[in-house]
Amino acid sequence: MALLPILCYPDPKLHRVAKPVAAVDARIKTLIADMRETMYEAKGIGLAATQIDVHERLIVIDVSEERDQPIVLINPELSWTSAEKHLNEEGCLSVPGIYDGVERFDAVHVRALDGDGQSRVIEADGLLAVCIQHEMDHLMGKVFVEYLSPLKRNRIKTKLLKAQREDAR
Ligand code: K1U
Ligand code: ZN
């Protein structure tokens, strides 16, 4: 297994739209294992392939307390969304140190292939529903800060670019 570097906002590669996974083969299974290890090491509850510069529709998630219930979503599609939406505090491994409120559906049903290539429907609410919507946005090239005001977004951009310049010294 390998730890993979995570792209940091405002890297333009975070805005690429991912293509469907063509086959759940050995390459994808290795990628899933590496993404899972990278997510756990970064202490995240989710990771989309876009964030590690792989532009295919693949997500790993684990919202369990014990960090022992990983979920793999390949080619995910929302099949149902609740009528109700609420504001939830979100963070992102690609936007380190920034947390803000985003409005999301309270509950979703998502159809996807699992890590064995089997078709599944996951019925999610709470943090899992929020995380699925956040990660599916990544696959569409959307980062959560794009829901914030232009003023907040520009402040975040400036702060992260400064931190990246200082890290590169
Ligand atoms: O996509 C990512 O970068 C992972 C991201 C997922 C996420 C967190 C919170 C709400 C929606 C999606 C993270 O794991 S950020 C770090 C984190 O563990 C966390 C942050 C805030 C609340 C809960 C967890
Ligand atoms: Zn994210």
Image (cartoon, rainbow, N blue to C red):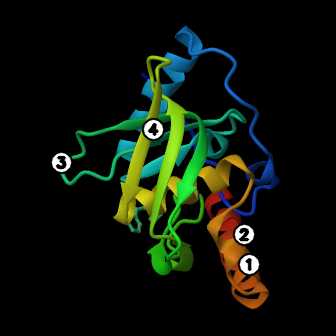
Residue 121 is labelled as: 4
Label 3 vs label 2: CA separation? 34 Å
- Front disc: 2 or 4: 4
Please indicate whether residue 78 sits to the left or right of residue 130 in the image: right
Q: Earlier in the sequence, mark 4 or mark 1?
A: 4
Q: On the image, numbered disc 3 is attached to which residue?
A: 66
The image shows residue 51, relative to residue 115, as above or below, that is below
Mark 1 and mark 2 residues within 8 Å of each other at the beta carbon: yes
Label 4 vs label 1: CA separation? 40 Å
Kind of residue sitting beneath label 2: Leu
Q: Residues within 10 Å of mark 2 (few under 14, many from 20)?
A: some
Please indicate whether residue 146 sits to the left or right of residue 91 in the image: right
Q: Earlier in the sequence, mark 3 or mark 1?
A: 3
Kind of residue sitting beneath label 4: Val
Label 3 vs label 4: CA separation? 23 Å
Label 2 vs label 4: CA separation? 39 Å
The image shows residue 90, relative to residue 108, as above or below, that is below
Q: Residue 81's quadrant in the figure?
A: bottom right
Q: Residue at x 45, y 77 (%)?
A: 89
Kind of residue sitting beneath label 1: Thr
- The residue lying toward the viewer, choosing from 84 and 17, is 84
Q: Residues within 10 Å of mark 4 (few under 14, many from 20)?
A: some
> Callout 1: helix, strand or loop?
helix
Kind of residue sitting beneath label 3: Glu
- In the rendered image, the quadrant that contains the C terminus is bottom right
Residue 161 is labelled as: 2
Q: Is residue 17 visible?
A: yes
Mark 2 and mark 4 residues within 8 Å of each other at the beta carbon: no
Image position, residue 49 (x, y; %): 61, 38
